[in-house]
Image (cartoon, rainbow, N blue to C red):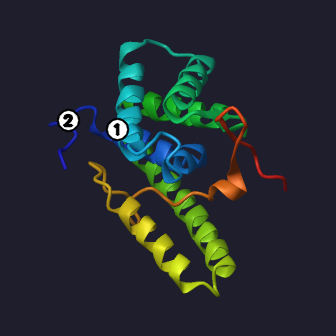
Amino acid sequence: MAGPKEDPRGLFRCGLRAVLEAWPVLQIAVENGFGGVHSQEKAEWLMGVVEEYFFNNADLEQDEVEDFLFELMTNEFDTVVEDGSLPQVSRQLQMVFGHWQRGEGAALQELIAQMAQKSQGKATAVRAARESEEEDDEDEEEEEMEVTDDTASAGSACPPPGPSGPPPGPDAASGGERTEDGWTVVRRKKK
C-alpha cells in the first residue's frame, strides 16, 4: 500500500471505498448482477468516477452528490434508489472528503474504522439470517459462501481494519425488486 506521501489521494480513496462498500443498494446491485456480467468491475469504476467527481468540483452541495450517485446507479446498474440512503451516503462522502481536505488524517482513519465495524456488524446479521433460512439446504449455503469469498477477495488498495472486502448485502428478495420495465427498486425495510 502506498503511504500518504506517495499517494496523496490514498486516504480519501480508502474512505470513499469504505462508504460505498457499506452502501447496501450498491452491494445488492453488484451481487445480483444488475449492472450486467461486469457488475463488480462497474462498482470499481464507479468508485474512481466518484473520486474524480469530488476532485474536479469545488464545494459540492449534498444534493449535487445525491443527484450524481442517483444518475450513476440508474444508468450503470438499472437501479432506482428509493430507500432513503442517498442523503446518508452523500453526507458520509462529503464528511470523508472534508476530513481529507483539512488534513485530518487521524479523524478520517477513525471514521473509516467505524464504518468498517458497522458494515461488519450488518454483514454478520445478514449472514446469520441467511444461514438460518438455508439451514436445511447445504448446497445453497456452500454456494453463498463461495460468493462471499469471491467478493472478499476483490482487490483493494485499502486494507480495512477488520476482515477484508465489501460486506455481503441483503439479497434481492429482501431489499430489491425488478419492475415490469426492467428497473430495480430498492426500498427501506419496514421496522
According to the image, label 1 marks what residue?
Answer: 13
Q: Say which element carries label 1.
A: helix
**Contact check, label 2 and label 1, Cβ < 8 Å:** yes
According to the image, label 2 marks what residue?
Answer: 7
Residue 98 against residue 137 in the figure, above or below: above
Q: Label 2 neighbourhood size at 10 Å, few (<14), some (14-19), many (20+)?
A: few
Cα–Cα span, label 2 and label 1: 10 Å
> In the figure, residue 37 lies in which quadrant?
top left
Q: Is residue 164 visible?
A: no
The residue drawn where x is 31% and y is 56% is 159
- Name the spot of residue 14 as percent of width and height, x first: 36, 44
Q: Say which element carries label 2.
A: loop
Along the line of sight, the residue nearer the viewer: 96 or 189? 189
Along the line of sight, the residue nearer the viewer: 174 or 69? 174
Which residue sits furthest right?
A: 191
Q: Can residue 45 be seen in this view?
A: yes
- Amino acid carrying mark 1 in the image: Arg
Identify the image quadrant of the C terminus: bottom right
Considering only order in the chain, which callout, 1 or 2, is on the residue closer to the N terminus?
A: 2
Q: Label 1 neighbourhood size at 10 Å, few (<14), some (14-19), many (20+)?
A: many
Residue 155 falls left or right of residue 64: left
- Name the spot of residue 76 as percent of width and height, x first: 48, 31
- Amino acid carrying mark 2 in the image: Asp
The residue drawn where x is 15% and y is 37% is 6
- Name the spot of residue 104 as percent of width and height, x first: 39, 36
The residue drawn where x is 60% and y is 44% is 25
The residue drawn where x is 57% and y is 17% is 64
> In the figure, residue 185 lies in which quadrant?
top right
